Image (spheres, helix red, strand yellow):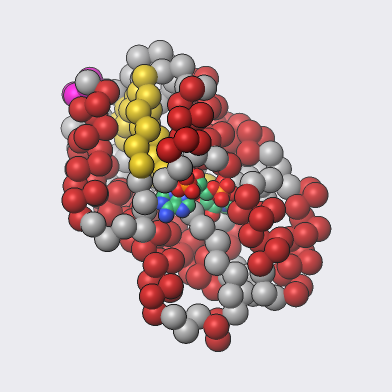
Amino acid sequence: MFSGKTVCIITGASRGLGKSIALNFSNLFTKDSVFILLARDDKSLSDTKQAISQKCVTQYFDQGTLDQSVFDSLLPRCLNELHVNTEEFEHACIVHNAGTLECEMTEDLVSVQSVSNYFNVNLIGAVALNASFLRVFQHVEHKLVIGISSLAALQPINSWALYCSAKAARDMYFKHVASEYPAIRVLNYAPGPLRTDMLTKTACTESKDPQVLKVFKDLAAKALSCDTSVLKLIEILKGNKFKNGDHVDYYDE
Ligand SMILES: NC(=O)c1ccc[n+]([C@@H]2O[C@H](COP(=O)([O-])OP(=O)(O)OC[C@H]3O[C@@H](n4cnc5c(N)ncnc54)[C@H](OP(=O)(O)O)[C@@H]3O)[C@@H](O)[C@H]2O)c1
């Protein structure tokens, strides 16, 4: 992927881990590669774009939308704007990074509307975007799908039921992609605790379970920079030894 013309799509590229993935991938990709950066905050997306050395398009994308036409038209519209055809690329890569954290105890998850909104953003939208990616880039020979996962996909964290459930479901969904399409490289990457808004503004202030709140307040001081975690991700990709569809954590050997 780092040696041929690549089209790279990153969700949640406006800040935090997604922005770091975009900038670090840009340092590695060939000059003729292109980036498609997605999120809702146009201004922050433009800031990320400024630091990308390849051709790059940013697009407003709310992953929680139920508007089918968004998923049908998003990628073709971005390719159009970049004046490129899918046949030009040796590699196509998508990083499903966009995500949110909800910190309620299970007995308080009474609102059907907010529970379904949560899964729309964190699960359904990623599934629909990924299907569009698989279709649009079906003739690109080498494809890589990265799901940004979490330790929360493997174990419960009290008051984070929606986050843990969505991450577990995404891991299984991406394992399915790997199983149905063995030629596509698929990785569920758990990036470790990161110094981002999700940790410092949400986990450390809104977690309803007092013990979890304390753990994350303590953890915030020791959290990793996004760049440190992304460099590990790049090492894993370059090593190319992961089993297709596996969950690989920053702290794994
Ligand atoms: N921080 C951690 O300690 C940690 C640990 C393990 C895993 N992760 C995972 O890493 C990923 C990135 O998290 P982060 O820590 O970088 O969080 P963050 O700083 O809060 O960034 C979240 C990103 O997701 C985007 N996003 C949120 N809602 C969206 C929506 N409805 N539609 C489209 N994009 C949306 C945001 O962009 P806009 O607001 O501009 O739309 C933003 O770019 C997430 O999947 C998270 O679960 C984080």
| 101, 191: nearer the viewer | 101
Q: Determine if the magenta segment contains residue 41.
A: no
Q: Residue furthest front?
A: 43
Quadrant that contains the C terminus: top right
Quadrant that contains the N terminus: top left
Q: Determine if the magenta segment contains residue 85.
A: yes
Residue 156 locus on image (x, y percent): 60, 71
- Image: 194 above or below 156: above
x 66%, y 61%: residue: 203
| 236, 97: nearer the viewer | 97
Residue 116 locus on image (x, y percent): 38, 71
x 48%, y 22%: residue: 50
Q: Which residues are magenta?
A: 84-89
| 246, 122: nearer the viewer | 122
Q: Is residue 43 visible?
A: yes
Residue 198 locus on image (x, y percent): 61, 54
x 51%, y 29%: residue: 47
